[in-house]
Amino acid sequence: MKLMTQEVIKGLPKLYSQENVEDPIVRVKFFTPDAGWTWYVTEGEQKEYDHGMDWLFFGKCVSPMCPDGEWGYTTLGQLQEVRGGLGLPVERDMYFDPKPASQCK
């Protein structure tokens, strides 16, 4: 599954564009189908790293160990390396509609 599409890219606000918004809009949902981890992405942009170009995302990660979620950064490269308990890769929820972070649980 392709995690980043042109539609996702067009709808993703730049980093820090929602930092003063009390309840930022989640634009993309990534998840592990076999481990209960979910990343609710509110912002992102491409950055250059030593290893080349990558997407840097900001959002909330919810997991079995942190059910209330934790805000922070991750990269597309990191998400592509994650495997769940059965070895399945991270997927993008193709049916996710943008909504305020408070509505994502």
Image (spheres, rainbow, N blue to C red):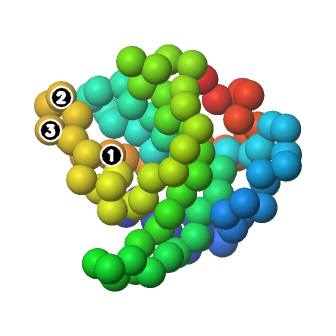
Q: Position of residue 62 (x, y in %)?
A: 49, 28
Between the residue at mark 1 and the residue at mark 2, the CA separation in whole angstroms equals 11 Å
Q: Which residue is mark 1?
A: 90
Q: Residues within 10 Å of mark 3 (few under 14, many from 20)?
A: few
Residue 92 is left or right of residue 98, and the answer is left
| Residue 12 position (above or below residue 81) | below
Q: Which residue is mark 3?
A: 87
Q: Visible in this render: residue 28? A: no
Q: Nearer the viewer, residue 86 or 74?
A: 74
Q: Visible in this render: residue 2? A: yes
Q: Label 3 amino acid?
A: Gly
Q: Which residue is mark 2?
A: 85
Q: Nearer the viewer, residue 30 or 69?
A: 69
The local secondary structure at tag 2 comes to loop
Between the residue at mark 2 and the residue at mark 3, the CA separation in whole angstroms equals 6 Å
Residue farthest toward the left in the current orientation of the protein? 86
| Residue 32 position (above or below residue 97) | above
Residue located 60% across and 23% down the image: 105
Residue located 39% across and 77% down the image: 49
Q: Label 2 amino acid?
A: Gly
Between the residue at mark 3 and the residue at mark 1, the CA separation in whole angstroms equals 10 Å
